[in-house]
Amino acid sequence: MPDGQRLAGRIVETEAYGPGDPASHGFRGMTARNAVMFGPAGRLYVYFTYGNHWMLNAVTAGPGVGSAVLLRALEPLEGLPQMAIARGRERPLDLCSGPGKLAQALCVDGAMNGEDLVRGSAIWIEAGTAVPSDRVGTTARVGVRVGLDRAWRCFVADDPFVSRGRPGSPRGSRTGTGRPRRS
DNA sequence: CACACGATTGTCT
DNA sequence: GACAATCGTGTGT
């Protein structure tokens, strides 16, 4: 944050978007908005949607390949008071339990689009404790109307901090390795 | 230049 | 569970 307070959380829910994926912003090629998706991996792709929400993604391949992972929910770990102020909500469960919520809680907006998440100092993702495969649930992605055949939403099963959008589903769990993050 | 639509959230019934 | 709010981006005229 501007005042030096560190805001951090553990990633508990994500969604993948990649080449040939009709639900991906990059499906129809590169545009001014999704340009970062086609750049080098490890960068932050931020975009605005629904009139007032910023979405945070980690670019996962490239250059030249449009792919990214949307950060959908975090278990807040550090700077909860500041997050509460930014969110206008007190309960920990209301701070980062959704893609738009966590962006607001972390005070991230379009100005940070393209930041380096690996070596950056403003915002970054670092390795954490792995989540056992049998604790990683997978379902179709939330809020999309295409690409529903791909179960590319991954979340920590039974974690209270995952977003409300379809917690579980008939789809069983799969593989996956968890890792936390911070800013 | 005009229009339709979101990788959502908060509030109300 | 259902629905309105809100506006930048993408696509078509």
Image (spheres, coloured by chain):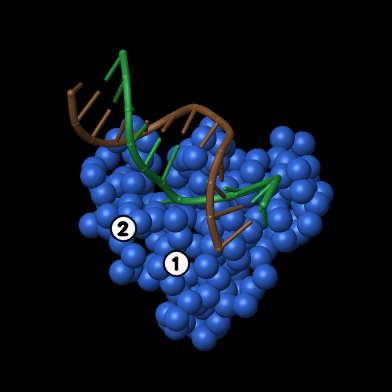
Chain colours: A blue, B green, C brown
What label does residue A153 carry, if any? 1
Q: Chain of mark 2?
A: A
Q: Are marks 2 and 1 in contact (CB under 8 Å)?
A: no
Is circle 2 on the same chain as circle 1?
A: yes
Type of the residue with mark 2: Val
* Residue A143 image position (x, y, % from top left): 44, 56
Tag 2 residue: A146
Q: Estimate the x, y position of residue A57 in percent, counting from the top left.
A: 47, 51
Asked if A32 appears above or below C3 in the picture, the reply is above
**Relative to B9, is A84 on the left or the right?**
right
| Residue A137 appearing in the image | yes
Mark-to-mark CA distance, 2 and 1: 14 Å
Q: Residues within 10 Å of mark 2 (few under 14, many from 20)?
A: few
Residue A101 located left or right of residue A114:
right
In the picture, which quadrant includes the N terminus of chain A? top right
Residue at horizontal 42 percent and vertical 63 percent from the top: A141
Could you tell me which residue is drawn at 59 percent across and 62 percent down?
Answer: A163
At x 33%, y 52%, the residue is: A24
Q: Which of the marked residues, 2 or 1, is nearer the chain's N terminus?
A: 2
Residue A116 lies left or right of residue A39; in this view the side is: right
